[in-house]
Image: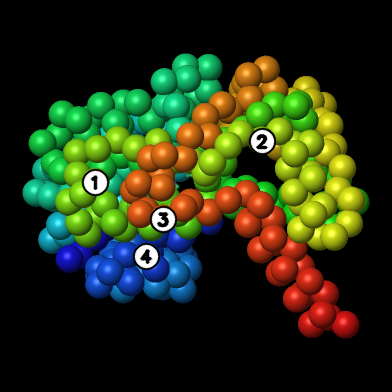
Amino acid sequence: MKVLMVGATGGNAGLVVPELKKRGVTVRALVRDGGKIGAARRVGADETVVGDLRNPASLRAAAEGVEGVFHINPAFAPDEAEMGVAMVEAAKATGVRKFVFSSVYHPSISGMVNHAAKQPVEEALYGSGMDFTILQPAMFMQNLDGAWSAVLKSGKLTMPYSKRAKVSYVDYRDVAEAAALAMTGTALSYGTFELSAPGMVDRVEMARMAGEALGRPVEAGELSPVEWASGSDMPEGPLRDGLVRMMTHYDEHGFPGGNALVLGAVLGREPRTLEGYFRELADQSTQTEEVSR
Ligand SMILES: NC(=O)c1ccc[n+]([C@@H]2O[C@H](COP(=O)([O-])OP(=O)(O)OC[C@H]3O[C@@H](n4cnc5c(N)ncnc54)[C@H](OP(=O)(O)O)[C@@H]3O)[C@@H](O)[C@H]2O)c1
């Protein structure tokens, strides 16, 4: 089976490539320009094709001759929905049989643009006639990688919303495995699946987990969305606006869910946990410290 892969060069969707390869899939990565070919090859893509989600003709050319498409929307692009719909239409036009869409948990939350933008793509798939699987992942545990160096330096785990906001997480490696299962079998055909690790956690609880993994105390830092915005040098634009709306939503409502029944059933095993993720981060830092000594 040959699959066109959108997002192979991204920090998270790149994890799907090895899962597809493990199952004998030939992966053709869509890259925006020739400069990204090396990055796509490094995660294991067999072929690359230059194309842009804003250029429907390039998507039709990219999808020619593949049986499946894996798609993820670029985060916070102002035309995120149009890009996703264009990929669905190109796949349909070229006779693609199977489409796997990595969407988002609770796309019906209208207050967050990065959630609402997934709905038109899901709707396009439901009407496409293609065999679809829609995966709706909670917040990625991989987001914690960015906060980890500050945890090591300052002993504080800080994010720009209330430390009492309860959030649902998922390890994107579990999502990647689900995507590959969906692509290469029929058990997940015509299904939409909420993917979350068990439980909802606030930052106080997360700091406790991080401290336990590191063997030293970690404190939950507090930073409001307004404080984040006034201290950030991110330029005005859709990314900044989208982030502030998302942080404000988390600050007020958290990101509730944490029901892992579906993910466990999809994978046929227990999902990876946040405690486990913190242990991996702590082990990696210990190994790095040992190497640099
Ligand atoms: N982060 C979370 O916790 C979370 C949770 C649930 C869902 N999501 C959703 O996951 C999605 C991906 O987020 P992410 O942060 O993982 O993204 P990412 O790693 O930055 O990946 C985005 C990918 O899209 C590619 N891309 C961007 N614009 C493109 C274009 N015009 N044409 C073709 N390819 C293009 C990028 O290519 P380049 O390498 O060339 O830039 C990259 O490979 C978003 O829709 C987000 O809402 C995120």
Q: Which residue is mark 3?
A: 269
Q: Left or right of 30: which side holds 104? A: right
Q: Distance between the Cα atoms at labels 4 and 2?
A: 28 Å
Alpha-carbon span between mark 3 and mark 4: 16 Å
Q: Could you tell me which residue is drawn at 41 percent across and 47 percent down?
A: 264
Mark with earlier residue (3, 2)? 2
Question: Which is more foreground, mark 1 or mark 3?
Answer: 3
| Residue type, mark 4 in image | Glu
Measuring from the top left, give residue 219's x and y in whole percent.
87, 42
CA gap, disc 1 to disc 2?
Answer: 28 Å
The quadrant in which residue 34 appears is: bottom left
Q: Nearer the viewer, residue 284 or 273?
A: 273
Disc on the earlier residue, 3 or 4 = 4
- 72 to 81, vertically: above or below: below
For residue 249, above or below residue 273: above
Which residue in the structure is indicated by mark 2? 201
Marks 1 and 3, the one that precedes in the sequence: 1
Residue assigned mark 1: 188
Circle 4 residue: 19
Total residue callouts: 4
Q: Amino acid at mark 2?
A: Val
Q: Quadrant of residue 204?
A: top right
